[in-house]
Image (cartoon, rainbow, N blue to C red):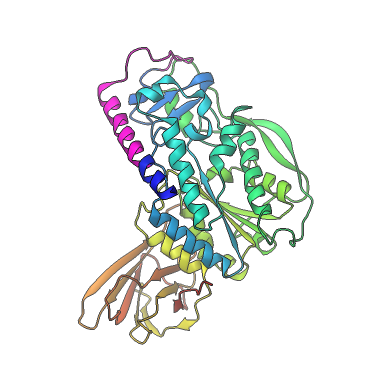
Amino acid sequence: MAGTRTNTGKSRAAALVASVCLCLAFGAPAGAQSSGFGCTGLDTSDALPSVEGEGGMFYRIDPDLMMAHGLTDGNVSALKEFSQALASQGTTLIYLPIPTKALGQPWQLPRMAGYLGYDQDVAATVYGESLDQLEGAGVRAVDARAALAAASKVAPAFFGTDPRLTAHGARALARSVAAEIEATPGFVALPKDQFQTSAGPKIKLPSAMRFDLQEHCQSPLPYPETSTIVMALGKAPGLLFDGAEAGAQIALVGTELTGEPVTGFAAQLQELTGLRVAQYSVYGGGAFAAISSYLTSASFRDKRPAYLVWEHPIWTQLAAHGDQPMRELIAAAGPECAIALPMDFDTKANVLRAEISTLDQARPHTLLLDTDGAQANSAKFSFMDANGLRRTRTIYRQVDQLLTGRFYMPMSGLWPEGAYNVEITLDAALGSAPRLFACRKAEVN
């Protein structure tokens, strides 16, 4: 039944999303509430189309007032496979889909949101039915919408002039993640430490959103301001890639929504679980920047955590760039690749070539290229069959993410008889000892 409800919700959401475009084109009805800061033209802003809610709570039209932020059947299937691949090597995935500000802080939404076609019930249904599908697939997922919406009745879970979580919102979210972790079979047996956080001095955070909004407002808008979260007992969460992963039981990857150190999501997660946390976040990194760096790294390969918490802003679609990013994560989550492939490489042209016809084409394989530390943002894999036909696929890294020099390329979707050889081209200099491996797909019981 969950699948049927999802389709209905998405169809209605799609129709109402279209109405947003019509309202933007022809204007909203008269009678919209007045601004508390003398703001005008927010909804037609070239920089950041927005609406002003009660008490100085501002919402972006896109993504906050878009409603079709759900998971497709393909997304759910890929997350299931990813979770199983991690579990086969001893790591439990905790998937954390962060809702839009309108879903997590709905109480201050203005009438203007409705004029633009936003329907809170539809948006909540789409989000909730994605969680139902994940539960049916055996993927542990956190209902972040319910946690934040409940918390925001007491105090703001999001900053008024910024899309990030407040310390209060981070606490509510950490509590829900901790509850999901504590419900797993292996939690009780893990060694625990004592951690305690406390509120430090208040600081104002810089905010690009506030800057864009201020151009439309006569009165000064409030800065995002919060008490800093500091450790009163125990060590602060470490950073992945800085050696902290060696002792971490929880690896946290995501964006600024959980990575902002001032609001202390990771610190509060430590306090609530008693488990050591190491984190890595990429500001504006969307779904894949942080997690692809971590899973393709030697840090993950050498010391896998008991739990992987993957924070995903739900409006950054998992399949926005096709299925390649998820397929790389699935391959990286499985067993270490063991089939070494001989190859030739040209260090001047940054090109590697290898014959792959000897691989068992009846079994799915993934190629792992270890460039020996090349700072490459992209790797282009050109597969050729015995007749010289060529199919090319490219893996891209985001500019701000840590570059590990390791790329996983699944060999699916080629020719029935398989590929004969592969040529790989990088956009950076190769290391002195690059290696190429073939990995067999992990067996799932």
Q: Residue at 46% across / 68% down in the picture?
A: 331
Query: Is 69 situated left or right of 416 in this image?
Result: right
Q: Position of residue 90 (x, y in %)?
A: 61, 68
Q: Position of residue 316 (x, y in %)?
A: 42, 46
Between 174 and 371, the one nearer to me in the picture = 174
Residue 299 drawn above or below residue 239: below
- The answer to whether any part of residue 225 appears in the image is yes
Query: Is 275 situated left or right of 409 in this image?
Result: right
Residue 159 drawn above or below residue 435: above
Q: Is residue 371 magenta?
A: no
Residue 38 position by quadrant: top left
Q: Residue at 39% across / 66% down in the picture?
A: 428
Residue 405 drawn above or below residue 252: below
Q: Is residue 17 magenta?
A: yes
The quadrant the C terminus occupies is: bottom right
Residue 212 position by quadrant: top left
Look at the image and give the residue range highlighted in magenta: 10-39
Between 362 and 167, the one nearer to me in the picture = 362
Between 267 and 312, the one nearer to me in the picture = 312
Between 85 and 235, the one nearer to me in the picture = 85
Q: Position of residue 387 (x, y in %)?
A: 20, 82
Q: Residue at 39% across / 24% down in the picture?
A: 114
